[in-house]
Image (tube, grey):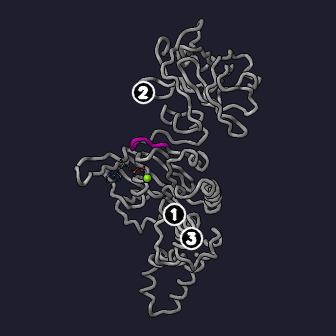
């Protein structure tokens, strides 16, 4: 196993037809620790696959360095990087059995051994039995032993996904790369496989970089999450750190469901000595140490961010919030989810999404008094979109 380091990594594609340049990865600096499960997440087209493919050696590097452990691998052939990759479309060989699909890479890898040892049947048998041992162990771990003789076309999507995973595991690589490996599975299987992959990582303890556009996968699977947008790394941290302290509006809006509410034209005003937020529809006074960070913004506009989970029905609000001033809003739509309901609220010109306990007595079309938890409010600089807190 090994760490992975991206150092000032750049990738520029030149479109063959238009000759236009696409700057797919921009000055990426990121270290994935030995044994870590890191999720690389961002919208489609932000450069995730490109970063992964450069690490695997499938794509030329335009600038910067990639290290596996402390070895620069820029000029090392893909097969010598000791990396296994699981693709979204699994890329199984259709004419080969599951067993042969899993054995193929290993046989290639050990081929020099085969050739040298052709005159030595004992050695050949030894290699064969080593390969067989690895396949049987992986198959057992993934519960696909009964499928080893089948061809890929006789497998379900979930089974194919396991075979692709098995093929990666048998190689016992230093680093696992997974590029949206669950996106072809149905929702239920995706949730189940998600948990299995986490368990597998716990057993194998192998450095893993997992690419997805799905923020729920990122939040549930990543020990750390690296968020990318337009080829640029936005922030890399643990899921809860990203959720509670997003560095900018993009990260704040991308992680968490439903998405964070933004009031784009909130004014910082003075209420006595202490800065307060005035949205034009209601005022929100912030705890002292937070308000102090807004002294430079008094008289200016900022963006206020509030997570749906931080808007409470006054009648059900935690006692710690009892002293806060309620805000009257109107309930537009209620979506019951079971334990909680998603409420679409409006406060004059502003609309909010709130996640509220299902035993709320809120009614569509009726007013509701809500309490916004001021300790979890986020403020962003309007020009830079960076978080003040
Ligand atoms: P993601 O995996 O995050 O969806 P990609 O890494 O596949 O994004 O793509 C990043 C950007 O690079 C996109 O704008 C994409 O269109 C462009 N791109 C990817 N591969 C090529 C290629 N072979 N030639 C030209 N542009 C490419
Ligand atoms: Mg991709």
Q: Position of residue 100 (x, y in %)?
A: 51, 78
Which residue corresponds to mark 2? 384
Instruction: For label 3, count other residues whose C-alpha is less than 10 Å away and answer few (under 14), some (14-19) or many (20+).
Output: some
Disc 1 crowd rating (10 Å Cα; few below 14, some 14-19, many 20+) is many
Helix, strand or loop at disc 1? loop
Which one is in front in this view, the residue at disc 3 or the one at disc 2? 3
Q: Residue 16: x and y, percent?
A: 24, 55
Tell me what residue is drawn at x 23 percent, y 49 percent: 18
When the figure is inspected, residue 386 is found, relative to residue 201, above or below; the finding is above
- 240 is higher (above) or lower (below) than 51: above
Q: Residue furthest top?
A: 272
Q: Quadrant of the C terminus?
A: top right
Which segment is the magenta one?
227-231
What residue do we see at 54% from left, 51% from top?
A: 38
Residue behind label 1 places its C-beta within 8 angstroms of ligand 2? no
* Contact check, label 3 and label 1, Cβ < 8 Å: no
> Residue 229: within the magenta?
yes
**Disc 3 target residue:** 155
Residue shown at 60%/16% (left/top)?
284
What residue sits right under mark 1 in the picture?
Answer: 174
Q: Which sits earlier in the primary sequence, circle 1 or circle 2?
A: 1
Q: Identify the main secondary structure in magenta.
A: strand
Separation of marks 1 and 2 at Cα, in angstroms: 39 Å
- The number of numbered badges drawn on the structure is 3
Query: Mark 1–mark 2 contact, CB under 8 Å?
Result: no
Residue 280: tell me if it is visible.
Answer: yes
- Alpha carbon separation for disc pair 3 and 1: 29 Å
Residue 71 sits in which quadrant? bottom left
Q: Position of residue 237 (x, y in %)?
A: 55, 42
């Amino acid at each position: 196993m090994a760490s992975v380091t991206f150092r000032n990594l750049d990738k520029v594609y030149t479109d063959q037809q238009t000759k236009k340049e696409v700057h797919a990865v921009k000055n990426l600096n990121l270290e994935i620790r030995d044994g870590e499960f890191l999720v690389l997440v961002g919208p489609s087209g932000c450069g995730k696959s490109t970063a992964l493919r450069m690490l695997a050696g499938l794509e030329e590097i335009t600038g910067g360095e990639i290290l596996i452990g402390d070895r620069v691998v820029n000029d090392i052939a893909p097969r010598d990087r000791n990396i296994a990759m699981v693709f979204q479309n699994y890329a199984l060989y259709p004419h080969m059995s599951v067993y042969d699909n899993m054995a193929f890479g290993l046989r290639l890898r050990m081929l020099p051994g085969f050739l040298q040892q052709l005159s030595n049947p004992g050695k050949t048998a030894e290699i064969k039995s080593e390969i067989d041992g690895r396949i049987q162990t992986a198959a057992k771990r993934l519960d696909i032993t009964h499928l080893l003789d089948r061809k890929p076309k006789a497998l379900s999507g979930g089974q194919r996904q396991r075979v692709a995973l098995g093929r990666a595991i048998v190689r016992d690589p230093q680093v696992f790369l997974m590029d949206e490996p669950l996106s072809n599975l149905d929702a239920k299987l995706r949730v189940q496989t998600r948990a299995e992959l986490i368990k597998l990582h716990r057993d194998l303890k192998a450095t893993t970089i997992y690419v997805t556009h799905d923020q729920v996968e990122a939040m549930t699977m990543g020990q750390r999450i690296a968020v990318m947008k337009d080829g640029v790394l936005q922030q890399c941290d643990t899921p809860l750190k990203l959720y509670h302290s997003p560095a900018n509006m993009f990260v704040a809006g991308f992680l968490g469901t439903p998405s964070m509410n933004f009031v784009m034209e909130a004014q910082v005003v003075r209420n006595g000595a202490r800065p307060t937020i005035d949205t034009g529809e209601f005022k929100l006074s912030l705890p002292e140490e937070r308000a102090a960070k807004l002294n430079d913004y008094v008289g200016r506009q900022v963006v206020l961010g509030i997570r749906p989970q931080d808007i409470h029905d006054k009648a059900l609000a935690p006692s710690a919030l009892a002293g806060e001033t309620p805000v009257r809003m109107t309930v537009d739509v209620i979506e019951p989810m079971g334990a909680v309901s998603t409420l679409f609220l409006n406060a004059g010109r502003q609309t909010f999404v709130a996640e509220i306990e299902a035993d709320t007595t809120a009614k569509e079309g009726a007013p509701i008094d809500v309490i916004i938890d001021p300790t979890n409010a986020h403020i962003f600089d309007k020009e830079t979109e960076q978080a003040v807190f």
